Amino acid sequence: MTILIFVTSLLAAMAIGMPIAYALIICGVALMLQLDIFDAQILAQNLVGGTDSFTLLAVPFFMLAGEVMNVGGLSRRIVNLALALVGHVRGGLGYVAIIAACILSALSGSAAADAAALGALLVPMMVKAGHDKARSVGLVASASIIGPIIPPSIAFILLGVTTNLSISKLFMAGIAPGLMVGLALAVAWYIVARKEQTQPRPRASATERVKALRESLWALGLPVIIIFGLKFGLFTPTEAAVVAAIYALFVSIVIYRELNLKQLYGVFVTSAKITSVVIFMVSAALVSAWLITIADLPGQVVALLSSFMDSPRLLMLMIMILVVIVGTAMDMAPTILILGPVLVPVVQAAGIDPIYFGVLFIINNSIGLITPPVGTVLNVVAGVTRTSMETVIRGVTPFMIAQIIVLGLMIIFPELVTVPAAWLSR
């Protein structure tokens, strides 16, 4: 009965057009009424207390770093470096998009920010070189979702905050799977683009490559600082976010000199608006998370899935199918905030490593960013490149299939995630 009330109240609130954050509060109220413990004071305390988290400070700073990165020239220099290295090979611009996405993911942690930067910079080049526009926008959209997988990742922060998982361990565990997703996209791009009659870019000279590398060194320094700082315990994920924001501001204003005070005001405002939405959503989700614990909703879910508890792989498969279905209708952040507190205790009861589950859960949610009809990244790429949604969906399909195959392999062979994660965490 509790599960039914939880699901029905949430879906009903969303069905009438209520914002996700308010729907989560309504869901919490419904659970309190069902448990006969309704108290407006408790509701308010949990709502306010949900934002009282040192870890959540990472969100506004990573948001700020991502905005500064795009406006201040860091993204463009990363793309220019990839162009100098592989832009001349057959289909090289596609590999540029994938390489740039992997590097940018270690800067911003936001798929939407990466999609906006890559879409504006690379899609016109790819179309001019003779690539099919649908394939071009599809590849850029698919590559952008590596952003939430490779650290730093806002998605991992949200999951860690709502489920009490180690964010540092999630960060380290996301590196290898993110690179595997990038490799799968490279294979898919090779297959779909090999028959195109394209005009390769001229090979960059050694001087041009050295120049591109030199100009991008400051941008490349940011992921190195963050990953090594986290690995060797120099700072926490929250402190890493502050380092990222200050570093990006310093490089953009002092080194590259592409960010002025007028632009800086706009960057701060944009970051603040996005952050306020995310933080309020987290706060509302923690109200539901508290009531989920009080109502023992995970225990009831375990009972429903008892027939799968003895087979971790089958259980993971069933959960991932559920997340895929939810991801077609819901954005990443609410999916994490709603399902994370319910599913993590379930996988722990089944003896599944929660960090391993967390990585697959975020990969699955990232794929949800390019699944219609809600796919946030699809809308970003369509808007930036002025392409119809139908064209973007058609172009993204082969690359999404490649990503789903990688996810399936990680379900069948957990060692693909756990072994690199253990090595990186040493």
Image (spheres, rainbow, N blue to C red):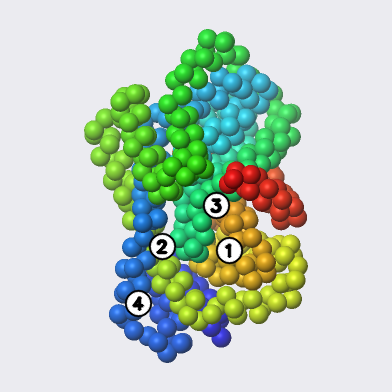
Q: Disc number at residue 170?
A: 3
- On-image quarter of the N terminus: bottom right
Looking at the image, tell me whether mark 2 or mark 4 is earlier in sequence order: 4
Q: Nearer the viewer, mark 4 or mark 3?
A: 3
Evaluate whether residue 124 shows in this view: no
Q: Earlier in the sequence, mark 2 or mark 3?
A: 3
Callout 2: SS: helix
Q: Residue at x 37, y 85 (%)?
A: 38
Whole-Å distance between the Cαs marked 4 and 3?
30 Å
- Determine crowd level at label 4: few under 14, some 14-19, many 20+ residues with C-alpha closer than 10 A: many
The span from disc 2 to disc 1 (Cα, nearest Å) is: 18 Å
Q: From the viewer's perspective, is the residue at label 1 or at label 4 nearer?
A: 4
In the image, which disc is placed on residue 43? 4
Q: Are marks 1 and 3 in contact (CB under 8 Å)?
A: no
Task: Work out whether mark 2 precedes mark 1 in sequence or the reverse, and give the earlier one.
Answer: 2
Is mark 2 in CB contact (under 8 Å) with mark 1?
no
Q: Residues within 10 Å of mark 3 (few under 14, many from 20)?
A: many
